[in-house]
Amino acid sequence: MTVLEPKEGRGRMRDWYRSVVGWMVRHGFVTAVLSIAVATAIFLPGRGVFAKAQWALLYLLVIVIVASVAGTWPAILAACLGFLAWNFFFLPPYDTFAIHDSKDWLSLGAFLVVGIAMGIQTGRMRERQERAEARGRETALLNHLSAYLVSEVSTDSMTQTMLQEASRLLDGASATLLVADHDERLSAAGGAEPSAADLRTAEWCYRNNKGLGLHAPDRGSATAGWPVIAQPGDWGTPNVDDSDVFLPLQTITSVHGVLHFARPAASEVPSKREEHLMVSIANLIAVFLERQRLQDELTSAVALREADQLKSSLLSSVSHELKTPLAGLSATISNLLEGDTHWDEQTVREELAAVVTNVTRLNNSIGALLELSRLEARSWPARRDWNDLSDIAAAGLAALPPHQRERVKVDMPDDLPAVNVDYEQWARVIQHLLENAVLYADGGQDVVLGARKSNGDLFMWVQDSGPGVPPEEKELIFEKFYRGKQAGATMPSGTGLGLAITREIVVAHGGSITVEGVEPHGARFVVRLPNAFEGEGAT
């Protein structure tokens, strides 16, 4: 024998009660007939106990119960059946419809009128309550979906959730979302793959911005957000089944696609409630797609603005570095070509030396731009090999002009092992760090290039005695085209790419670069390269 727990027993009783009430609601007229029949069978044994008028009150109670469960029309049927049952079974002479007392005619008429009135009023109250509860559930669900769409960013996730909720709200109706691409071609973003005929119908709705399968909203009803509904039989309007609904996803700016509802074949045409739900769901999806479009446009606009800012920075930072040597070249060569001037050999050599200086400066500027672009495009990968750091330092020093080269003091131990780096790229690191330090070194003082090994890591630094780097600029100086504010107007101009290139190369090697202050003034750029000496025994 199975013993039910109290909660389990209550749960089964509740499920049984709901199933019985659901059956009564679905079969309202049968409920009315059965209710009057069962009530009559219960009342008959007491026919001789109560007065005849008291049975009318009991039948009115049954009518109210039928109206509260099954609705208005079953309640009217119950009132008519109660009228007949009271007359036949409880008004003398019994078991006949004949009436001997004329006062009973008045009682019967009053009973019928009151029963029908009570049934109508109670049924209408029940129907209004059901509509209010349904609207409350639908409003709560639509609010939930609206909040979900505000936070959702994935079109696929949105589509899956919205179509599932649509099927649940519309009693099993299937939904298919067709979204237009940039070429204004519709494709299924969720739901079942549409047939060729459904796709043609959806394309017609998209091109004409008209809905199909719904009734036009009544005058005086809320029409905000409703699409224009094409009427069947109008010229050019496709024919659709009663179970199909096509709604364009329209916003104030454009049409983003079409939402297709397909109801079960055996179901009736959509009710007004279902039509409003379909339009609300379509509007929510349209707003989501509009938000996605605006987000994409905002992202593109931000990218374009950043590209414009980068272009402006490039032009403002590089134009001087490119134009100045070109202007110097043009002026020097023009002077040399003057036919009315006699140039001695020493002057010609000096002018040609100026040409070489300007060409070198121009070449360095262009080379820095190309190096940075290659690094950012990953087209200049690091080809690491075992190299002597002193050889790399010599290559970096050789890239400096002779008068700057003389100001660099190298502080490296003789027994420093070989390091695993890209020779050419690391030479660029040393070159750019030294160029930056020489540029800002105070009063022509020396610049120190040092390196040490610590726990398998390489620490390399370049120190100058210039104005130093303020704390707020310690990250900015590694950005493209940025030159320190303390450089002052007397500092020679530069492209502002040297430190940016240095950081790109160091990061590509798995290292890091920082800048420190030096007392009493100056800056020290420190490069740390982890595991730079692993496998050094092989060399």
Image (spheres, grey):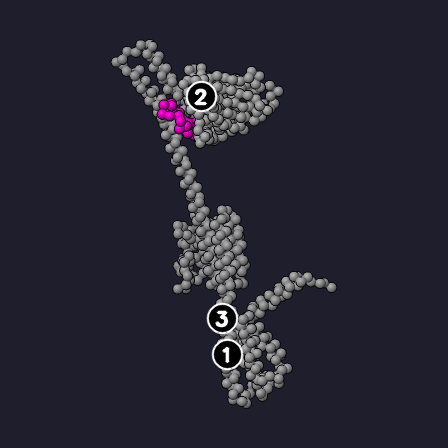
The residue sitting at the left extreme is 340
Q: Nearer the viewer, residue 193 or 405?
A: 405
Q: Which residue is disc 3 drawn over?
A: 124
Does 512 lie within the magenta span? no
Q: Which residue is disc 2 drawn over?
A: 465
Q: Amino acid at mark 1?
A: Val
Q: Secondary structure at mark 1?
A: helix
Based on the displayed image, in which of its 4 quarters is residue 23 positioned? bottom right
Other-residue count near label 2 (Cα within 10 Å), few / some / many at <14 / 14–19 / ≥20: many
Q: Residue 465 location in percent, x, y?
A: 44, 21
Q: Earlier in the sequence, mark 2 or mark 1?
A: 1
Q: Amino acid at mark 3?
A: Arg
Q: Which residues are magenta?
A: 480-498
Other-residue count near label 1 (Cα within 10 Å), few / some / many at <14 / 14–19 / ≥20: some
Based on the displayed image, in which of its 4 quarters is residue 322 positioned? top left
Q: Amino acid at mark 2?
A: Ser
Q: Residue 418 location in percent, x, y?
A: 57, 20
The residue sitting at the bottom extreme is 100
Give the number of marks: 3
Q: Secondary structure at mark 2?
A: loop
Label 2 and label 1: CA atoms lie apart by 107 Å
Q: Residue at x 38, y 23 (%)?
A: 491
Q: Secondary structure at mark 3?
A: helix
Residue contact between numbered discs 1 and 3, judged by CB atoms under 8 Å: no
Residue 316, disc: none
Q: Residue at x 53, y 20 (%)?
A: 451
